[in-house]
Image (cartoon, rainbow, N blue to C red):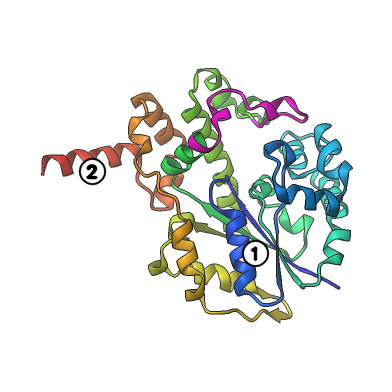
Amino acid sequence: MDKNLVFIASGGRTGTQFLGDLLATIIDDCWSEHEADMFAGFTAKSWQRIQDFGLWHMIVGRAFGQTGLRAAGTKFLLGKGDIESQAGKLRRQRVNYHSRIEQSLIIESYWRWWMFSGQMGKIWPGAKTVGIIRDPKSWISSWLAHDKSHSGTPWTYYFPPGPVTPARIGDVDWTDRWDSLSPVGRLAWEWREIYRRLDAASQLDQNTQLFRFEDLFDPKTGAMQKLVDFASAHPGKQYVTGNIDDIMPLVRNASSNRKDAWKSWSQQDKAIVDELCGSLIDKYGYTSMDSALSAKEISFVQ
């Protein structure tokens, strides 16, 4: 049976797996899938993925940088594999598993799909991509609170094919400054790299749409309904959807609040975040560090 596919991509810390599971509860004939990365954390669901995809794909191949989305995406960004070879490999890794799923709509919610922004149609013709963007102030704070390895060198960097850094992808402007950046600055560079690619893809491809994380978690914006409508409409089939109000209480309860953590960052870090992320901050209606600080000072004076 042919499958309709939706991929949820982001920079992480945006509830991609949670959103995929929510969509599966409200869209008829829909299955939610999440590719677990064994080297980013082993969970109870990891055992099921080993049964689904095999020991080589889930553990051995990943240790050698031969399998998994993280390895494929990193190689592509580093110019170590063209899109055709990576596309073929990714399809082969999933086709048998997809064929065993009863539902005809599969939503795969692994945030690292951002690595193939603008190329998804070559990997999965006709597939849709949902991008989730989050305010860099709260996104960076969330990563620092969630993964202490961002305060140093993540141990996964030592597994092939290694990390994505300015030097390795040819970002000359930031290569010389990389060693002097704090964890906040390095995460700001990652945020810019991820979302400039997703933003560009959403401008060029009608099958890619970018949603603000904060809007999805606010029932007044209607963003969750727009996401459901986008994910459920496919050529030849419009999937039946349930009442969006049934899932919004779950969405509100799942939202995370780290709005003020950035205030403790150094002035240099705040300036770096504005320098790196400023254009996308403006485009997506977020507040720059400088403006946020000014607003705080005005509020204090009043």
Q: Of circles 2 and 1, which is in front?
A: 2
As drawn, the residue found furthest toward the front would be 44
Residue 64: give x, y in percent of width and height.
84, 32
Most foreground residue, 125 or 300: 300
Quarter of the image that includes the C terminus: top left
Image quadrant in which you'd find residue 16? bottom right
Residue at (64% x, 25% y) in the render:
167
Residue 147: give x, y in percent of width and height.
56, 34
Residue 174: give x, y in percent of width and height.
55, 26
Count the numbered circles shown.
Answer: 2
Q: Is residue 163 magenta?
A: yes
Please tell me whether residue 45 is drawn above or below residue 38 in the rendered image.
below
Residue at (68% x, 49% y) in the render:
113
* 279 displayed left or right of 146: left
* Residue 207 disc label: 1
Residue 235: give x, y in percent of width and height.
72, 76
Residue at (86% x, 66% y) in the render:
99
Q: Residues within 10 Å of mark 1 (few under 14, many from 20)?
A: many
* 217 displayed left or right of 117: left
Residue at (81% x, 33% y) in the render:
63
Most foreground residue, 47 or 206: 47
Q: On the image, numbered disc 2 is attached to which residue? A: 295
Label 1, secondary structure: give it: loop
* Residue 87 disc label: none
Query: Does residue 208 appear in the picture of this structure?
Result: no
Q: Distance between the residues labelled 2 and 1?
A: 38 Å
Q: Does the magenta stretch include residue 278?
A: no
Q: Give the range drawn in magenta.
A: 145-164
- Look at label 1 and name its amino acid: Asn
Most foreground residue, 77 or 243: 243
